[in-house]
Image (spheres, coloured by chain):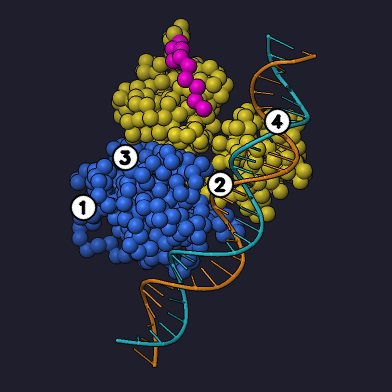
Chain colours: A blue, B yellow, C orange, D cyan
Amino acid sequence: MASRLTHPVVLDPQGGIDPCATCEARQLSVCNAIADADLARLASLAVVSEAPAGRSFIDEGEPADSFFNITAGSAKLFKLLRDGRRQITGFVGVGHFLGLAVSDTYAFSAEAMEPVRYCRFSRGKLRKLLDDFPLMEKRLLEVAATELVAAQEQMLLLGRKTARERLASFLIARIGLGIPGAPPCAHQGATRVVLPMSRSDIADYLGLTIETVSRTLTRLRLDGLVALDSPSEVVVVDYLALERVATGMV
Amino acid sequence: MASRLTHPVVLDPQGGIDPCATCEARQLSVCNAIADADLARLASLAVVSEAPAGRSFIDEGEPADSFFNITAGSAKLFKLLRDGRRQITGFVGVGHFLGLAVSDTYAFSAEAMEPVRYCRFSRGKLRKLLDDFPLMEKRLLEVAATELVAAQEQMLLLGRKTARERLASFLIARIGLGIPGAPPCAHQGATRVVLPMSRSDIADYLGLTIETVSRTLTRLRLDGLVALDSPSEVVVVDYLALERVATGMV
DNA sequence: CGTGCTTTTGAAAATCATCAAGTATAGTGG
DNA sequence: CCACTATACTTGATGATTTTCAAAAGCACG
């Protein structure tokens, strides 16, 4: 459930002249479409805020007046039904851009998993910025297109895969984004996958219950496909077999 | 299953000087971002083709060298698992833009439901066009953002809703896009919903089986929420009750 | 008026959810 | 440092929704 504590803290603009120039998230985000010379203008639009773990900083249904760009930490995105059923639509990290929608209310909620820092842009101002920097708009389109593909893949998972296949797909995907830039084929040996989210989060992401997630992981372990060092550390023992399960080739 | 007949027929460029100027789909598509004066250039890039009902004109996994814009008819988009399980990710009609993805292969297949006519743009050429017409890029971003929101809604449906709730949501959504522009609140009386797709398509869209779709529609009928004139014509009798079911407020 | 298809309906089976209890783990305070 | 508590995770038994298997009913078409 979304926690409704106080509002996130707005940080003082960093003392430095141009925070965007030194932003570690820049190379991972759409902000890398802005040339160095223009970073000051970008920085002037951004309001840096942060939210502690467990705090929600976007609430589904609220007026959507801002875009967000995550510069530190990670968060989960989700939608709720009235009786509390939750569907997590994604886990996002540094560089992720949020709030891309035409609607005047947010279509999802976002809650920090670890402490999150983010830049907040007012919709109107960012729109004007995009008019001047078509390269950034191009990057946003790329990002949106990539997410659309991921969303379709998740629909296939939620609509047609078994619990076992969902867990296998989830673990494979986690390997894929382990170290961005690392070759996704270097899995001859055992690969360690860290799961920073709870079983409850995994369940709500995969459309299952926590019990089914737990049982299914146990079965994957008994079948020799993975090993469980701790609840949050899975070692993929047989990558190819796991991949076969994930794609329904069992 | 995807039908693999011969290739779609490429039509002769229409005799008229500027087919885009007279295109009925223009106002419904991203092409309305191009000014009249520039339509000739747009038209020079488009290759008009068509596919008869049942023919697939995009195949998941094939090299993605083109974008598509549907100018007549309708199609279903889907992804397949190796054993034939299918997830339909959307039904698309006139004005819909397809192929927005960074990947070098298509992430989904598209199959005509009724005879489809579409404009095909080579990726490279359209990319150059977008450089010159940022307004069109803006429209594409809007479209992508809107689809992303719809995809998240569908994830909620597939991951967390019951069969009854899925059917109710589906019917409500169908009303919403009945006549684009019509007020979505004018449902005091009974509203007729036409389902141009088969039970099998509905099932694969909602992550169910055809039997469950059929049974669930029957139950909605017995409960007085809808009436079934024919398999493809549903009359929504109690819109508010159906909406309550759709949002999990049973 | 068959023939082939889609849809509906029925009975049995299976997967996954729910309910319930037990085990591990981390954090807290004595 | 050790118990104690709270929380998360795992495991077990039962149950419900949905799937699967099967057959009948409805429709279009030749």
- What amino acid type is highlighted by mark number 1? Ala
Give the letter of the chain under mark 1.
A
The residue to which callout 1 is attached is A21
Q: Which mark is residue A139?
A: 3
- Quadrant hosting residue C27: bottom left
- What amino acid type is highlighted by mark number 3? Arg
Q: Residue at x 49, y 33 (%)?
A: B84
Position in image of residue A73 (x %, y %): 32, 59
Q: Element at badge 3? A: helix
Classify residue B72 as left or right of residue A71. right
Classify residue A211 as left or right of residue B174. left
Between the C-alphas of marks 4 and 1, the distance is: 61 Å
Q: Which mark is residue B231?
A: 4
Q: Residue at x 37, y 34 (%)?
A: B101
| Quarter of the C terminus of chain A within the rendering | top left
Between the C-alphas of marks 1 and 2, the distance is: 42 Å
Q: Element at badge 4? A: loop
Counting labels gives: 4
Magenta region: B1-11
Find out whether the residues at labels 4 and 2 contact each other: C-beta distance under 8 Å. no
Q: Nearer the viewer, residue A187 or A199?
A: A187
Q: Is residue A45 visible?
A: no
Find out whether the residues at labels 1 and 2 contact each other: C-beta distance under 8 Å. no
Between the C-alphas of marks 4 and 2, the distance is: 23 Å
Position in image of residue B128 (x %, y %): 30, 26
Q: Which mark is residue B157?
A: 2
As for residue B209 lying within the magenta part, the answer is no
| Vertical comparison of A68 with B50: above or below | below
Q: Residue at x 39, y 56 (%)?
A: A221
